[in-house]
Amino acid sequence: MARHEPAAIRRREILSLMAAGALAASLPFPARAQTPNVAALKIGFIGAGREGGALGTLFAKAGHPVMFSSRHPETLTGLVNSAGPNAKAGTVEEAVAFGDVMFLVVPYTAVEQLGKDYGAAVAKKPLLVDVSNPIPRRDGEDFVKQVNEMGGAGVVTAKYFPGAKLVRGFNAIGFGKLEGDATKPDGKIGVPIAGDDKSAIELASALITQIGFVPVLVGDLAMGKYLVPGTPLAGEHTPDEIKHIVTTLKS
Ligand SMILES: NC(=O)c1ccc[n+]([C@@H]2O[C@H](COP(=O)([O-])OP(=O)(O)OC[C@H]3O[C@@H](n4cnc5c(N)ncnc54)[C@H](OP(=O)(O)O)[C@@H]3O)[C@@H](O)[C@H]2O)c1
């Protein structure tokens, strides 16, 4: 895998934020102390396929009311049953109305239209976690090239969901690994996150901590371009490994 040149300015900014504790997401996060009501948050999922279904199940089993959504919610009965009594299914519109916070877990080609349809409602919420990725083999080489030319997935989702308190996260941990990673007995797995909004980062960090992972802030939304499959940050890493990898990336 290609190694990238260090970006001294970006790294200094991130390290100084970490040192100052201004963005606590890279540290083992005292979630309940900083966001005492996080356990009660209702979570709406736009996209409840393999990744959205697995993530929503973790949150439902951790005690959150979760609404999975689909354009055909009647297809989600099996998922709802396996996620337990905290889970239910609805339309995308219903999930957006339901969620205190939202997760976006759809093919990236759907993001622009979803932003047009639901962006205004989502912008009123304190957090949108963007798990969606532009993937050449699914979305097409030209589409992915265009997203990258526009600044990559973090910047582009922000453009399509104007005003959303956006954090990218969970983008390159496969759905089949999530449950095992969340309950891993021998050292926690880090979840690299990127965002511009401090409160949203803190909220996302608390939620990530609650289901058994360690959030690691890698930078602003421009760094969200590295939170996709096929980059050095993809896959499962310890928090320390993620912090090291970040020092090798260009902002
Ligand atoms: N699979 C993984 O391990 C993994 C890991 C990390 C990140 N991701 C990312 O997560 C996203 C979803 O991947 P996936 O593997 O979960 O895909 P998937 O199993 O195909 O599920 C896609 C979900 O998106 C919904 N969706 C698609 N088009 C939509 C639209 N126009 N409006 C509303 N909902 C729409 C589908 O709902 P309908 O029932 O309405 O079709 C379905 O719930 C992708 O961007 C992927 O790169 C995946």
Image (spheres, rainbow, N blue to C red):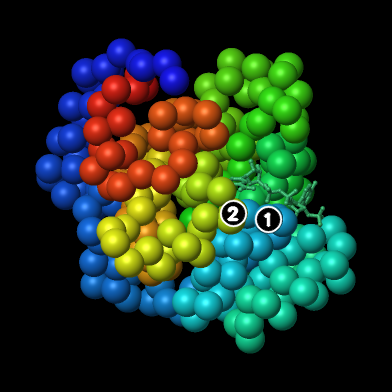
The residue singled out by tag 2 in the image is: 175
Tell me which label, 1 or 2, sits earlier in the chain.
Answer: 1
Q: Residue at x 52, y 70 (%)?
A: 59
Q: Position of residue 72 (x, y in %)?
A: 87, 62
Residue at the farthest left position = 19
Which label is found at residue 181? none
Frontmost residue, 124 versus 86: 86
The secondary structure type at the circle numbered 2 is helix
Q: Secondary structure at mark 1?
A: helix
Task: Measuring from the top left, give residue 218's x and y in whole percent.
Answer: 33, 37
**What residue is disc 1 on?**
50
Q: Position of residue 174 (x, y in %)?
A: 56, 48
Amino acid under label 1? Arg
Q: Is residue 139 left or right of residue 74?
A: left
Residue 164 can be seen, yes or no: no
Q: Are marks 1 and 2 in contact (CB under 8 Å)?
A: yes
Image vertical order of residue 247 relative to residue 19, above or below? above
Disc 2 residue type (three-letter): Phe
* Quarter-of-image position of residue 16: top left
With respect to residue 27, does 249 lie above or below? above
Task: Confirm or reject: label 2 Cβ below 8 Å from ligand 1.
Answer: yes
Identify which residue is drawn at 70% across, 59% down: 48
Residue 199 against residue 144 in the figure, above or below? below
Confirm if mark 1 falls within 8 A of ligand 1.
yes
Q: Where is residue 68? Give x, y as percent.
A: 69, 67
The residue at 29%/73% (across/down) is 32
Cα distance between the residues tagged 1 and 2: 6 Å
The answer to whether residue 138 is seen in the rendering is: yes
Bin the neighbour count of mark 2 within 10 Å (Cα to Cα): few under 14, some 14-19, many 20 and up.
Answer: some
Q: Residue furthest front?
A: 186
Quarter of the image with the N terminus is: top left
Q: Residue sitting at 19 percent across and 43 percent down?
A: 18
